[in-house]
Amino acid sequence: MNIQYKKGVLELCVLALLKKHDYYGYELSEYLSKHIDIADGTVYPILRKLKNEGLLTTYVQEDSGGPPRKYYSLTSLGREVYEKEREEYLDFAKKIEILLEDDNDEKE
Amino acid sequence: MKKNEFLAKLKDELKKNNVADIDEIISEYEQHFAFKMADGYSEEEIAARLGDPLQLASQFESNIEYKTSGGKKIAAAIGLVFTDIFTGAFFILLVAWEIIMAAFAVSNLVIAACLFGRVNFITKFTPMPYLSAVVIGISAAALAVLSVVGCIYFALFIRQLMRAYGRFHRNTMAIASGGAVLPPLAIYPRLPAKVNRRLRSVALFAMVVFTTSFVLGMIISMLLSGSIEFWHTWGWFGYNAVN
């Protein structure tokens, strides 16, 4: 699948995951590279961008054993932006789906 | 590529691209290595799966755009002070109107209660027959409900307007200083459809009750007093009562 598609929706995916609960960077990287098949390192620039925009905050938590973990958490602004973009994306995807399935019908 | 080589390449490239907080970024990748190595992956494997450090570095936003001239920022700040003063006055006006509407609702409720309870504290009005008092009281109560709904709508509207202005304020500063611009907010409050429907039907019901009971109250008063200008007959507003 085209890498550009994936990059476009990656921000939305990160926000969607963080809406459920807080994650540390590595967890997000693992989840996304497993499910969307992108390079492991791609998620960190996105996290940084979202943080710069005020959609995420971070806090460090020391867990027993292993290095201290930097957790990412959605801000109320992030929540708001996520709801809006989610709606826009679903609406867009629905339209594309109709268009593509229409094409399918004509061929058969 | 070994871990140290990967991190060094990434660091150099980030420096070249003028990215802020490089140490923080590097420590994030260091953590990634640590977690993966704990899972038993080799350094080479981890580096390969992370992706090309040159490419990764290019995905971090350069800091240059955040360092726009201070003059632009100051100009935006001064402009915003004036819009803030103007908008602030406007908001005071809106809030004042909200208070007036609330006072109107309360006074209607008091009038209704007085009419129902045969309380007459306004000496300008001589008591009217209880039947007309009850019917007009119902219309006053309905008007109170109507104005309460109006108050709720208007309060939500003011709140949303303030939030939208706050967002505009923030975005203007963000543009001037090269920060991220957020989506603007709608001016009108977007209530859940259910709440919206309920408020509308309450308002509609109150409106119908108000009009019918008001007209009915007038007619009943006219019939009971035997005169179209019943307020003359009952001696309201300082007229001498006609007996």
Image (tube, rainbow, N blue to C red):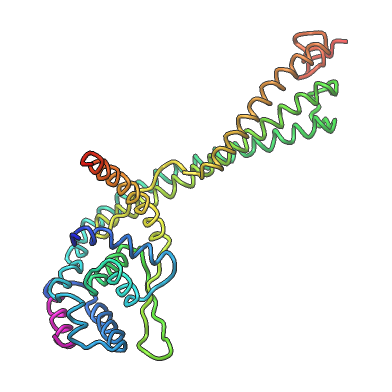
User: Which quadrant would the N terminus of chain A be assigned to in this image?
Assistant: bottom left
Query: B92 or B176: which is nearer to us?
Result: B176
| Quarter where residue B20 is shown | bottom left
Q: How many numbered marks does the figure carry?
A: 0
Q: Which residue corresponds to the image point at 56% horizontal and 37% vertical from the top-left? A: B197
Quadrant of the frame with the C terminus of chain A: top left
Query: Could you tell me residue B44's position as x and y percent?
Result: 17, 86
- Residue reaching furthest to the bottom: A65
Toward the right, the furthest residue is: B243
Q: Position of residue B60 (x, y in %)?
A: 20, 69
Q: Which residues are magenta?
A: B1-15
Residue, x 34% and y 49% (percent of image)? Answer: A88
* Nearest to the observer: residue A2 or residue B112: A2
Question: In the picture, residue B49 is in which quadrant?
Answer: bottom left
Judged left or right of residue B120, residue B48 is left
Is B177 on the left or on the right of B221, as rendered?
left
Q: Depth check: give the residue in front, B171 or B60.
A: B60
Q: Relative to the observer, which residue lies in front, A22 or B99?
A: A22
Q: Is residue B11 magenta?
A: yes
> Is the stretch drawn in magenta largely helix, strand or loop?
helix
Identify the residue shown where x is 27% and y is 44%: A101
- Residue B94 left/right relative to B15: right
Q: Is residue A62 magenta?
A: no
Q: Is residue B178 above or below residue B121?
A: below
Quadrant hosting residue A35: bottom left
Q: Residue placed farthest to the front in the image?
A: A108
Q: Is residue B182 above or below residue A65?
A: above
Q: Position of residue B83 (x, y in %)?
A: 35, 46
Q: Residue at x 69, y 35 (%)?
A: B107
